[in-house]
């Protein structure tokens, strides 16, 4: 998710994006930005004066700005996407460069967002948004509603983690190869 430019610049860009879409919006930190950061599990570190001395107005990513971790960058990017009220969120290897603690926080964020979308749909009858995760680390997708197994550019099977373990030889083999960390060594034969 943190690609295509410096993700650490996302806080200022998120505010600018909201103002661009709503030119009459008040100056300052908009409630939509605070809510998006809360939903993305970013509000805690953004509002912490030790990590972000000026809160939502802290410059990040530049030589003089606040330093943020890879996991914090990912959560800022998620918040930036949420400000736009998307119908589809695509996470392409969103945890591949993160340490295990940061991976856990980002994965909890994605799971929370998915639950929030389900709850919204149950209350209103209208779909909230869909999340698509592309991953080689199978532990990051094992709780997904639907997992699509692909090989050689073709869909081999689809289902939940448990369903696929029971009926899809390729998925079961990949799961075994992934070991405790859930990361597949692509140098091994699958």
Image (spheres, rainbow, N blue to C red):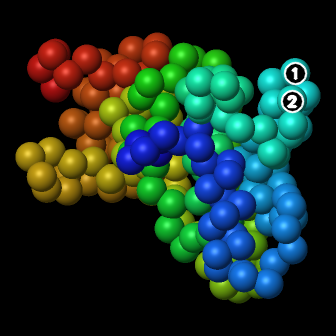
| Residue 146 pos. (x, y %) | 45, 56
Q: Looking at this view, is 175 or 116 the one in front?
A: 116
| Residue 90 pos. (x, y %) | 45, 56
Look at discs 2 and 1 and give the one toward the viewer.
2
What residue sits right under mark 1 in the picture? 50
Residue at 46% x, 14% y is 180
What residue sits right under mark 2 in the picture? 53
Residue at 32% x, 53% y is 148
Q: Residue furthest left?
A: 152
Q: Looking at this view, is 16 or 131 the one in front?
A: 16
Q: In this view, does 17 lie above or below 63?
A: below
Residue at 68% x, 48% y is 11
Q: Is residue 136 above or below residue 16?
A: above
Q: Say the numbered circle drawn on residue 37.
A: none
| Residue 136 pos. (x, y %) | 33, 33
| Residue 7 pos. (x, y %) | 53, 41
Label 2: how many residues lie within 10 Å, few (<14), some (14-19) or many (20+)? some
Q: Quadrant of residue 36?
A: bottom right
Q: Is residue 117 above or below residue 49?
A: below
Q: In which quarter of the image is the C terminus?
A: top left
Q: In which quarter of the image is residue 135?
A: top left
Q: Is residue 7 above or below residue 116?
A: above
6 relative position to 20: left or right: left
187 relative position to 168: left or right: left
Q: What SS does tag 1 mark?
A: loop
Residue at 59% x, 31% y is 62
Q: Which residue lies furthest to the front in this view?
A: 64
Q: What SS does tag 2 mark?
A: loop
């Amino acid at each position: 998710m943190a690609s295509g430019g410096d993700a650490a610049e996302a806080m200022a860009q998120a505010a600018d994006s909201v103002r661009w879409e709503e030119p009459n919006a008040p100056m300052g930190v908009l409630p939509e930005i605070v809510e998006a950061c809360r939903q993305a599990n970013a509000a805690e570190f953004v509002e912490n004066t030790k990590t972000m001395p000026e809160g939502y107005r802290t410059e990040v990513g530049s030589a003089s700005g606040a330093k943020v971790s890879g996991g914090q960058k990912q959560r800022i990017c998620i918040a930036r996407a949420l400000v736009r009220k998307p119908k589809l969120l695509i996470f392409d290897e969103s945890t591949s460069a993160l340490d295990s603690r940061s991976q856990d926080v980002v994965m909890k964020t994605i799971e929370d967002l998915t639950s929030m979308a389900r709850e919204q749909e149950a209350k209103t009858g209208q779909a909230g948004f869909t999340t698509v995760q592309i991953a080689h680390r199978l532990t990051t997708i094992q709780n997904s509603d639907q997992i699509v197994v692909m090989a050689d550019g073709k869909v081999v099977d689809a289902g939940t983690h448990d369903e696929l373990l029971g009926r899809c030889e390729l998925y079961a083999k990949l799961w075994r190869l992934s070991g405790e960390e859930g990361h597949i060594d692509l140098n091994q034969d699958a």
